[in-house]
Every structure is written in C-alpha cells, then in structure tokens.
Amino acid sequence: MAIALAMAGERPVIHERQRETGDAICGGFLSWRTLASLERLGVAVPGHAVDHVRVFAGEMTASAPLPGGAIGVSRRVLDRLMLLRAEAAGAGVERGVTVKAWDGAPMFLATGKHELRGLMRPKAAGDPTLGLRLRLPPHPSLARLIGGAIELHLFDRGYVGLVAQEDGSANLCLAVRKSRLAEADGNPATLLRQIGNGPLGERLAQADWSQPIDAIASVPYGWRATTTQAGVWRLGDQAACIPSLAGEGMGIAVASGIAAADFWTRGMDAEPFQRAFARRTSRPVGIAKLLWQAAENPRFAALGVRSIGVMPSLAALAAKVTRIGD
Ligand SMILES: Cc1cc2nc3c(=O)[nH]c(=O)nc-3n(C[C@H](O)[C@H](O)[C@H](O)COP(=O)(O)OP(=O)(O)OC[C@H]3O[C@@H](n4cnc5c(N)ncnc54)[C@H](O)[C@@H]3O)c2cc1C
C-alpha cells in the first residue's frame, strides 16, 4: 500500500510496532500472481522455487503441478524487502510505534491478525482456529523430501503446510482447531508428534524441538469487510482473511494495497473501495473456506487426495480459483 501510494507521488507514513523486522507466523508461500504484483511494485523476492503441490491425507498422497511458478520465502526477508522498497519509493517508516486506537484521521488499517480498539472484527464463533509455526533447520534429507513442492498434510481438524525457504530451511505452519489441540493437552509439540507418523514424521525427523513453536490464537478465517467507517481503509487480513490453506493471504494483502492506493489517488472514499474489494475477494475466500472445511474432515480429505491422484488438473484449478482476480 505504502509503496503504491509513494510511487503515485504521495508521502504516506507507516507505523510499525516492531522495532526489528520479525518473522510473522505465515506459511511463506507466494504465488505466481503475487510475485507478478510485487514485481510491478519494484520488489524482487528471492525464494525457493516451488512448482507443484503435494497433498497427504492418512495413507494417501497425490502430487500435481501448479498453474505458475511460486516460491517459499521467510517473512523476515519479505517484510524487510517491502519496508526497504517503501522507504526507497518515498514513504516514511516509523518503527516501534504502536497505534492504540483510531484518531479519526484517514487511516490505512493493516494490522493483520491484530485488532485495533474501536475497529475490531467480530470474534469467530464455534471451535476457533489457531495458527502454529515451527522452523525446520536446513538438512539434505529434508531438502530431498520436500524438493520444489508446497506440501499440505491434512489431518482431523487441521492441516500442516510445509515449504522450503530461501536459506534452505523449511517452514512448517499449521492451522488447527482448538478442540484438536486440546486433545494433545494443548501442547503443539505433542500434537505434531501425534500426527507425525508416516511422511510428516520423516520430515520432522530433523526438527529441533528446543526451538519455540510460535502460536497465534483465533484466526478469523473467512471474514471479509463488506463495509467500513468513513476514513478507515481496511487492507490485508483486515479486509479479507482467506483460509491459509490457499496460500493467498499475502496476495490479498498486496492486491488490497494496490487497489486502495488507486482509489485514494483518484480522490475516492474508503467505503466504495471496501465494497469493491469485498466483491473481488468473495470468490477466492468463499472457495478457500469450502476447501479448508473439506480438508479438515478426514473422509472428504481422503476423497480430495484420491481425486487429485486421478485428475491432477483439479489441484491447479483449485489453486487458480483461490487467487484474487484483477
Ligand atoms: C498458519 C498460517 C499460515 C499462512 N500461510 C500463508 C502462506 O503460505 N501464504 C500466504 O500468502 N499467506 C499465508 N498466511 C496468511 C498471511 O500470513 C496473512 O494473510 C498476511 O500476513 C496478511 O498481511 P497483513 O499485511 O494484513 O498483516 P501482517 O502480515 O500480519 O502485518 C501486520 C503488521 O502490522 C503490525 N501491527 C499490528 N498491530 C499494530 C499496531 N497496533 N500498531 C502498529 N503496528 C501494528 C504488525 O507488527 C505487522 O508487522 C498464513 C497465515 C497463517 C495464520
């Protein structure tokens, strides 16, 4: 957003609460479309090349080519590059500044999973979803196993996403229902050991269990802002929180920033932007939600993997329809 605004001659200021660029809990999968959008913004992202998806459910596995070249990249690297690009384009970056509440001035709200007082999204009802992340250190056998794939290991009430990153390490991210984690005594390491037999266990063989497993609570998957207050431009997860299984959250974040900058420079208000952007996210978020709910159910997950095995083009189709359109 700040990059697009600065490229259009505006002088936006980013308020970032973290003093140092962190490594957000994220699968780190960037699609061909997101890479193209970033390139247009002047951001070249180094990453591990990914050209196919491999899906596991129980004993079954299937593999299929992706519709375009993707990458695995750590958020530490991606976020640093984007902040540097924003500064180079003319945006101000103020680090260590936590915005506490909206003061009524026009604001581009891009706080991701975090809520801002007075502008909170409704809490997800039912069995909430948690996001977890474990970094796997570089290892030749891990590199051989994952290769150029984005892996999805489906299990009852959750999935594990696994991809190699720019430095040879691998990023293991999972989304899991609270009730399933409770069955593992609320302990993410216990959960990983419970579901980590078979192929996932092979990949976890080199895990360094002394590393922390990062967690984020109650991810509001499926939520979309269909309206907004005057002056509040909701971006990224604050505009639409697509189930992470689709690997399109960052695509939506980038697309929302570009679209908001376009509306702003044409002198338009936040409300028409939000409505237009909600229309663009309707299909990808709706389909991703259906796929995620099916993937969480072992019977549907097995059926899905079997179908991809018979017809690999189904995976490419799912990957296409869960990308945000122009
Ligand atoms: C388990 C999991 C796996 C995922 N995997 C993928 C994937 O593989 N590919 C993909 O594309 N997406 C993935 N996503 C989704 C993706 O991480 C998000 O959609 C994306 O990060 C949203 O970007 P954002 O800019 O809205 O928010 P964020 O990336 O969360 O950035 C928000 C920023 O705002 C700052 N901030 C927050 N509050 C304040 C405040 N009050 N004041 C100042 N600064 C503040 C934060 O420090 C942070 O830097 C995944 C998500 C989860 C939970």
Image (cartoon, rainbow, N blue to C red):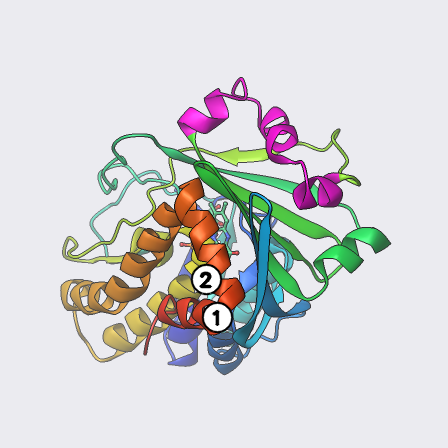
**In this view of the protein, can residue 247 be seen by the observer?**
no
Q: Is residue 11 above or below residue 298?
A: below
Circle 1: residue type: Met
Crowd class of label 1 (few under 14; some 14 to 19; many from 20; radius 10 Å): some
Q: Give yes or no for residue 203 being in the magenta stretch.
A: yes
Circle 2: residue type: Ser
Q: Give yes or no for residue 69 being in the magenta stretch.
A: no
Q: Nearer the viewer, residue 81 or 175?
A: 175
Crowd class of label 2 (few under 14; some 14 to 19; many from 20; radius 10 Å): some
User: Which residue, given by chain and number where applicable, does mark 2 sit on?
Assistant: 307
Magenta residues, dominant SS class? helix
Q: Residue at x 77, y 35 (%)?
A: 208
User: Which residue, given by chain and number where applicable, does mark 1 sit on?
Assistant: 311
Where residue 82 appears, as percent x and y from the top left, is 54, 65
Pointer 1 with pointer 2, Cβ within 8 A: yes
Q: Bounds of the magenta span?
A: 178-204
Direction from residue 148 to residue 3 in the image, left or right: left
Q: Nearer the viewer, residue 107 or 35?
A: 35
Q: Nearer the viewer, residue 197 or 306?
A: 306
Circle 1 sits in a helix, a strand or a loop, which is it?
Answer: loop
Direction from residue 187 to residue 261 in the image, left or right: left
Q: Residue at x 43, y 79 (%)?
A: 7
Q: Residue at x 53, y 68 (%)?
A: 87
